Image (tube, coloured by chain):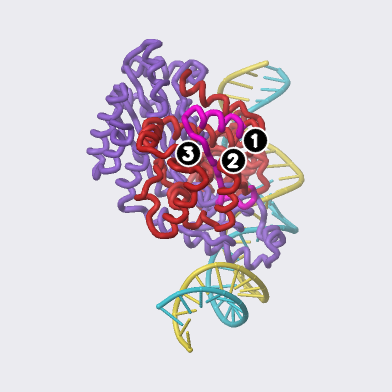
Chain colours: A purple, B red, C cyan, D yellow
DNA sequence: TTTTACCCTGTAATATCTTACAGCTAGCTA
DNA sequence: TAGCTAGCTGTAAGATATTACAGGGTAAAA
């Protein structure tokens, strides 16, 4: 059975339940006891889109949420905040500092002995991560994780794609029909760089009125109530990258 | 030698030349004769960049550019335009239609018999793809490609990360010592949501003057020239998560 | 005790943004 | 031909942000 045969079923899942079952199955075949997949799309503050497929022990997940460990979790920082493209294997170099070490030790009590986290980024401002863990605690377990790290990363990619297809089957208005013109992006970018209307006008060789016009149009498309709102949304949605 | 030992050298490359050599080496070890990696950022106008690492035959690359094959290349559409997260193996299902088939057949004449393309997306609007090809033309070659598809995807991830570090010379976007106070974050968050100073003042039960004060302090810390700039920076730096 | 960080407030001139009105050109497509 | 999109411009009142001046407090650390 090839890797593709292993992952393809994910794309056929029509429901979140099926996705959970299939992922559990695949993770098990790779030798992992636990998994958690999370994706978040910073479309806006008012309409954030977040999706979590939890294959972690409920008790640990509850504790994680209760203590707001997301803020100190280095794997979260690596995959979501810093938006790195490469996986991270859980070791002491990663979990350094008192808070992180404490969190890591606690997680071991729930059966998360060894593991790794895999980032995936979609092209629409969506950042996701898949964490895979095993209750085996040995050097051999670590070596096995390393040996299948490619497959694991691929699983993350497929899972992300599958999730997008299910969750976005009724895609939010903000993500689909959001297309800014070149000029609108240009104005937004310079505005995000701290330029005033007049300065942008000089840069683009147009009048200040025109800059206002484009920024207004961009804001209307994104449902922004003012210039700051428009900039925040455009960045969060990945429409511009200052 | 584990996969990680194989890929880690990419992150140590300090120059584009070293990156090319290392990638050629790794691709060779995976059994590929040719590779091409390209990344493009179409969301950034103030800091745009496009980067191509070519390990394809020069003649084919020249022909590709000359005929603007990018427009009909289904692998490009898959990875860059549609921004899919999963790899695509070159087969007849992918290269369908007269134009695509013709292009595919031409590419075979330059030694690109079998291959696959792997998308990678960074978190900053950057879309990249790595294509790997072999001059072997057999079912066995195809099977081998499938068998190492995980490693290949991982290579794409590492190559992307390595490229980012070189091309962007490791942007100091995430300043670790940058710390905003609770009030500053609070004001920034509401401002990013489109609230005016007066509205934020009502929400926080303080005067508008105080809101101005906090936003000013936050801006100064981040070297922002105005409110919009401060919001853009705070989001980009992950200091606030709207 | 002094220092430091954080929080809060006031006035006022000036700069900038927002919004409403109104109208132009060019290129493409049905 | 008409309709559409993208781009561009003008005026003007009112809302909001920026800046510089001034000052108050608490709590914890040195």
**Disc 3: CA contacts within 10 A as few (<14), some (14-19) or many (>=20):** some
Q: Secondary structure at mark 1?
A: helix
Q: Which residues are magenta?
A: B19-47
N-terminal of the pair, mark 3 or mark 2, is 2
Q: Is residue B58 magenta?
A: no
Q: Are marks 2 and 1 in contact (CB under 8 Å)?
A: yes
A227 vs A147, nearest the viewer: A147
**Disc 1: CA contacts within 10 A as few (<14), some (14-19) or many (>=20):** some
A107 vs A68, nearest the viewer: A107
> Are the residues under badges 3 and 2 in a single subunit?
yes
* Percent of width and height locating residue B182: 53, 34
Q: Position of B35 compared to B223: left or right?
A: left
**Disc 2: CA contacts within 10 A as few (<14), some (14-19) or many (>=20):** some
Q: Position of B113 compared to B60: left or right?
A: left
Q: Is residue A130 above or below residue C30?
A: above
N-terminal of the pair, mark 1 or mark 3, is 1
The label on residue B202 is none
Residue of label 3: B135
Q: Is residue B39 magenta?
A: yes
What distance separates the C-alpha of mark 2 from that of mark 1? 8 Å
What distance separates the C-alpha of mark 3 from that of mark 2? 19 Å
* Percent of width and height locating residue B113: 45, 42
> Are the residues under badges 1 and 3 in a single subunit?
yes
Residue of label 1: B16
Question: Which chain's residue wears label 2?
Answer: B
Residue of label 2: B53
């Amino acid at each position: 059975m090839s890797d593709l045969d292993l992952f393809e079923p994910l794309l056929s899942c029509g429901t979140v339940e099926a996705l959970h079952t299939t992922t559990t199955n695949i993770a098990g075949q790779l030798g992992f006891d636990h998994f958690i997949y999370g994706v978040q799309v910073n479309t806006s503050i008012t309409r954030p889109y977040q999706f979590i497929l939890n294959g972690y022990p409920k008790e640990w997940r509850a504790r994680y949420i209760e203590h707001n460990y997301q803020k100190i979790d280095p794997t979260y920082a690596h995959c979501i905040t810093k938006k790195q493209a490469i996986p991270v294997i859980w070791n002491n170099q990663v979990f350094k500092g008192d808070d992180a070490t404490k969190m890591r030790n606690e997680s071991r009590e729930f059966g998360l002995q060894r593991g790794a986290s895999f980032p995936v980024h979609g092209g629409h401002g969506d950042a996701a991560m898949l964490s895979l863990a095993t209750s085996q605690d040995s050097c051999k377990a670590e070596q096995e994780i390393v040996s299948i790290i490619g497959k694991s990363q691929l699983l993350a990619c497929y899972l992300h794609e599958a999730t997008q297809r299910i969750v976005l089957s009724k895609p939010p208005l903000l993500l689909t029909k959001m297309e800014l013109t070149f000029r609108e992006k240009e104005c937004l970018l310079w505005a995000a760089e701290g330029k005033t209307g007049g300065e942008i006008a000089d840069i683009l060789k147009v009048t200040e009125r025109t800059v206002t016009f484009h920024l207004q149009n961009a804001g209307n498309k994104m449902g922004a109530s003012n210039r700051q709102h428009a900039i925040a949304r455009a960045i969060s949605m990945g429409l511009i990258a200052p």
